[in-house]
Image (tube, helix red, strand yellow):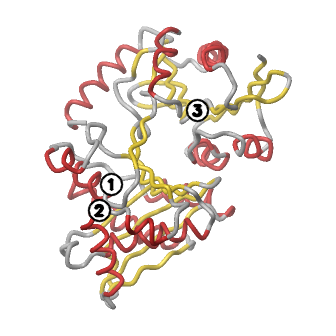
Amino acid sequence: MDIKEITSKKVWEDFLLKCGEKTFLDSWNWGEFQRKQEDKVFRFGVYKKDLIAVFSAVKIIAKRGVFLFVPHAPNSLENVDKKKLLEKITAELKELGKKEKAWFLRIAPVWSKETEKIFKDLGFNPSPIHIHPEVTWELDISDSEEKIISGMRKTTRYLVKQGEKNKDIDISMSCDLKDVESFYNLLKETAGRHKFVPFSLNYLIEQFSCFNPDGQIAVWLGKYKGEIISSAITVYWQGGAYYHHGASLQKYNSNKVPASYLLQWEAIKEAKRRNCSTYNFWGIAPEIKSKEDAEKSSHPWAGLSLFKMGFGGERKDYAKTQDFPLSPLYYLTSSFEKIRKSKRRL
């Protein structure tokens, strides 16, 4: 196997069309967004005569340390030996990490949980935290709208239909950059309510700007009597739709004004119009596997997880994020992240 840098968007995207397991974090445009964040981005192809796998590495310089991060990769053809592939990639990243003065490597694989043993055998440790979701909720939308509706939780189905009947609720989709600010205003309110630090407006604008020229992103606005009370940003890439960001006001009871439910249904229908086969609701609480779990859970994401699960679909688990130490300084980062995770009850 040989590893070479890839500089062609077409080569990158065309290869990913052949891969089964992937998310929009593997897209060329996500890498361009990372560059706008002033991060170094390295894109590599693994060749065995022909291209058999790709992966990107982002150099992250944070208060907790310097590291190379590989998001939702490697992405490979089905018949590739994963252990040999990871061994080759790790060797390449170790050399790159030393050149970039990284404390450690961090890989968030898009592989199944069964592959965690491969990482362990190669000297990786499970990461104290994850940057992107390790557990998502995904809905197959290849069926008819009628079948998708019938597969929803009874309460969700009822609220979607009530939303459709309510003339005061209006759902619209926008590809206009100015509407990112409308989303951000709701995000600040949501963050204050749930006590988390929101992404900055600049972060959201730059992300939108990278995907928008290719028609791969949209802002959804849910209005009640002209007031925006619900919003979302969705990404559409290579046959998959992703509910990446969401925000809402708590001003109205969602059972009486179900704008968020109708907004998701409209986003799902748009994904079908774009010939997507899946709608990924993105992260849910790792401990939650059923409606009953969500109702009993004290996890900060329990309510949001129940909301997402109500639309039907299934839980999707990826292998845990993995770390490979390159310096004793890694253990400072690891200790800090363990403390932070405990404080956030995640």
- For the residues labelled 1 and 3, the Cα–Cα distance comes to 26 Å
Q: Nearer the viewer, mark 1 or mark 3?
A: 1
Residue 243 found in image quarter: bottom left
Question: Are the residues tagged 1 and 2 within 8 Å (C-beta)?
Answer: yes
The crowding category of the residue bearing disc 3, from other C-alpha atoms within 10 Å (few below 14, some 14 to 19, many at least 20), is many
Q: Amino acid at mark 3?
A: Ala
Q: Residues within 10 Å of mark 2 (few under 14, many from 20)?
A: some
Q: Position of residue 308 (x, y in %)?
A: 34, 56
- In this rendering, the answer to whether 159 lies above or below 109 is below
Residue, x 49% and y 55% (percent of image)?
140
In the picture, residue 164 is in which quadrant? bottom left
Furthest residue to the bottom?
167
SS at mark 3 in the image: loop
SS assignment at label 1 = helix
Q: First in sequence, mark 3 or 2: give its number.
A: 3
Q: Which residue is mark 1?
A: 309
**Residue at the location (65% across, 14% down)?**
84
Q: Amino acid at mark 2?
A: Arg
Q: Which mark is residue 73?
A: 3
Residue bearing mark 2 = 153
